[in-house]
Image (tube, helix red, strand yellow):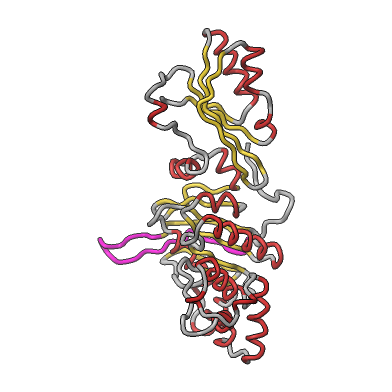
């Protein structure tokens, strides 16, 4: 089963990497932060890039706004080869790409309103117009009452909202989020995710999210690329990567949301016979699968673990069970499960 978001809509690419690499250093000291990446990001989507520290995620998105130039290959944004631009033409193109940072990057000595208005003031917009626009976006992000405050007076979540307001004041076509929720608590992270969704829905802004948090990918993004050692090792819809992770790195990240190992104290008390992990999707989650195994097939079922989560408007469930019974009934139970759920996997105790 391969599931892609918005299959009925056009997927014109606004960002395209074509065999793009970024190498730092020379000779024996050369290291590829991004290594031969070919990737398209569709206009108007929310696209995630996930990987461990050092995977090349931040370098990848810095190539989108021209802060890093590819050593080889090309990075095209809205039909323009960013690396071919210099001087004023590059700066003009960069205005179409907003950036949200992990550490907020606010100027402490000026007000929230002036922080937000700063990009327009740097563009030469008159103060009255810049202030009017700043007040508009502060209203949008829910901080109209903090316009005259200074960053030191704000919580972490409020500071990030200011950073978002500043990033969208130029009405960019692409919004880049570099670990934008990593410094925030879970409740504030949810609020920032909701705000980013609203920016995408209201303005049609393409959003590219770099993170090492699979929960953020699950709750926010439609598509995801998994990076390791500078390469994209897997790419697909978020749901498809959750349900069918093909690469070890992807499976490890999915395992942070849908656990795929039993606690050691549990596994130490079990043998390895007929220990199965079931993956269920949507209606399968509420189907009477366990009762059918017991009542109709006649096997005993020991439920060791079960949970569920929401992924892009789909319910994904996971269960670890141990079957008990004679070989014929166990075989029948396995056949039944393989027809009724997404996947059945042997679990080593």
Residue 89 in view here:
no
The residue furthest right is 8
The quadrant of the picture occupied by the C terminus is top left
Horizontal placement of 61 versus 219: left or right?
Answer: left
Q: Residue at x 41, y 21 (%)?
A: 270
Q: In the image, residue 35 lies at what x, y percent? A: 41, 57
Q: Which residue is drawn at 56% across and 84% down?
A: 114
| Camera-nearest residue between 279 and 193 | 193
Horizontal placement of 133 versus 245: left or right?
Answer: right
The part of the image, by quadrant, that contains residue 286 is top right
| Camera-nearest residue between 244 and 25 | 244
Q: Residue at x 51, y 43 (%)?
A: 257
Q: In the image, residue 40 lies at what x, y percent? A: 58, 57
Horizontal placement of 30 versus 334: left or right?
Answer: left
Give the dominant element type of the magenta stretch: helix, strand or loop: strand
Query: In the image, is residue 244 above or below residue 302?
Result: below
Residue 168 in view here:
yes
| Magenta-span inclusion, residue 175 | no
Q: Tell me the magenta residue range.
A: 13-33
The residue furthest left is 28
Q: In the image, residue 282 lies at what x, y percent? A: 67, 36
Horizontal placement of 130 versus 82: left or right?
Answer: right
Query: In the image, is residue 121 above or below residue 189?
Result: below
Q: In the image, residue 61 lies at what x, y percent? A: 49, 64
The quadrant of the picture occupied by the N terminus is top right
């Amino acid at each position: 089963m391969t599931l892609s978001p918005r299959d009925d809509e056009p997927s014109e690419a606004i960002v395209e990497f074509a065999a793009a690499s970024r190498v730092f250093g020379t000779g024996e000291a050369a290291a590829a932060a991004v290594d031969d990446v070919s990737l398209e990001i569709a206009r108007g989507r929310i696209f995630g890039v996930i990987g461990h520290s050092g995977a090349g995620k931040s370098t990848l998105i810095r190539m989108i706004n021209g802060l890093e130039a590819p050593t080889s290959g090309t990075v095209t944004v809205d039909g323009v080869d960013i690396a071919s631009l210099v001087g004023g033409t590059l700066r003009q193109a960069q205005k179409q790409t907003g950036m949200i940072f992990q550490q907020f990057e606010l100027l402490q000595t000026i007000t929230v309103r002036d922080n937000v208005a700063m990009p327009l003031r740097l563009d030469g917009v008159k103060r009255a117009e810049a202030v009017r626009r700043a007040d508009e976006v502060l209203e949008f992000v829910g901080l109209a009452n903090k316009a005259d405050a200074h960053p030191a007076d704000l919580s972490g979540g409020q500071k990030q909202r200011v950073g978002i307001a500043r990033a969208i004041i130029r009405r960019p076509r692409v919004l880049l989020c570099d670990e934008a929720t990593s410094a925030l608590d879970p409740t504030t992270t949810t609020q920032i995710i909701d705000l980013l969704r609203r920016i995408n829905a209201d303005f049609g802004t393409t959003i590219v999210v770099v993170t090492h948090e699979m929960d953020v990918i699950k709750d926010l993004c439609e598509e995801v690329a998994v990076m390791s050692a500078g390469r994209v090792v897997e790419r697909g819809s978020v749901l498809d990567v959750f349900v069918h992770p093909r690469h070890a790195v992807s499976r490890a990240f999915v395992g942070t949301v849908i656990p795929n190992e039993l606690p050691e104290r549990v596994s130490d008390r079990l043998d390895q016979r007929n220990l199965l992990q079931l993956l269920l999707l949507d209606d399968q989650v509420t189907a009477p699968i366990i009762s059918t195994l017991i009542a109709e097939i006649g096997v005993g079922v020991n439920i060791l673990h079960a949970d569920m989560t929401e992924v892009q408007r789909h319910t994904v469930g996971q269960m670890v069970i141990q079957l008990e019974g004679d070989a014929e009934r166990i075989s029948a139970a396995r056949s039944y499960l393989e027809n009724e759920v997404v996947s059945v996997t042997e679990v080593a105790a």
